[in-house]
Image (cartoon, helix red, strand yellow):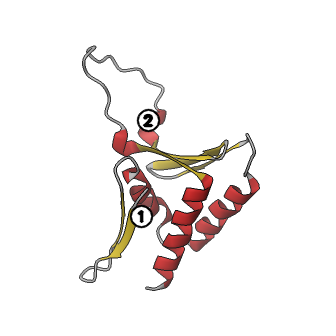
């Protein structure tokens, strides 16, 4: 998984750009984590505590949710949790590639440490 953190010098906004299949991680970092180091600490503590555990832990955000279980981190749009079934024609599929991403605990920890280092610089 490739990623890059940037800060727009004109308006001060942050950007987290991730490779295909992991784009939602960038949205999650910007929209749900931001510069909240307490939230970063909470997630890092959970990653350590849950290593090699089958328990599940969730951090539900405004638009995106982080789920930790079985050494995998899943970030997905809250709209994907909808239990309403929609009727689609057979040849149409709901596109959720940019609304869902899975990675290992170690990868997520590396990303979050990189984000922490990045926001400390500004």
Mark 1 Cα-neighbour bin, 10 Å: few <14, some 14–19, many ≥20 = some
Q: Secondary structure at mark 1?
A: helix
**Residue positioned most to the top:** 90
Mark 2 Cα-neighbour bin, 10 Å: few <14, some 14–19, many ≥20 = some
Query: Which mark is drawn over residue 103?
Result: none
Q: Looking at the picture, how far across and down is residue 111, in whole percent? A: 51, 64
Q: Looking at the picture, how far across and down is residue 116, in whole percent? A: 53, 74
Indicate the quadrant containing the N terminus: top left, top right, bottom left or bottom right. Answer: bottom left
The quarter of the picture where residue 36 lies is bottom right
Q: Which residue is mark 2?
A: 80
Instruction: Using the image, determine if residue 121 lies above or below residue 45.
Output: below
| Residue located at (46% from left, 42% from top) | 78
| Residue located at (35% from left, 20% from top) | 86
Q: Secondary structure at mark 2?
A: helix
Query: Which mark is drawn over residue 30?
Result: 1
Q: Is residue 48 left or right of residue 34?
A: right
Q: Is residue 37 left or right of residue 88?
A: right
| Total count of labels | 2
């Amino acid at each position: 998984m490739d990623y890059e953190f940037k800060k727009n010098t004109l308006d001060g906004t942050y950007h987290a750009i991730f490779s295909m299949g992991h784009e939602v991680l960038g949205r999650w970092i910007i929209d749900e984590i931001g510069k909240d180091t307490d939230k970063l600490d909470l997630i890092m503590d959970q990653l350590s505590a849950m290593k090699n555990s089958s328990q599940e832990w969730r951090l539900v955000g405004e638009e995106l949710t982080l789920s930790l279980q079985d050494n995998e981190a899943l970030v997905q749009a809250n709209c994907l949790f909808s239990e309403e079934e929609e009727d689609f024609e057979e040849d149409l599929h709901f596109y959720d590639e940019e609304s869902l991403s899975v990675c290992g605990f170690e990868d997520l920890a590396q990303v979050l440490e990189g984000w922490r280092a990045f926001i400390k610089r500004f």
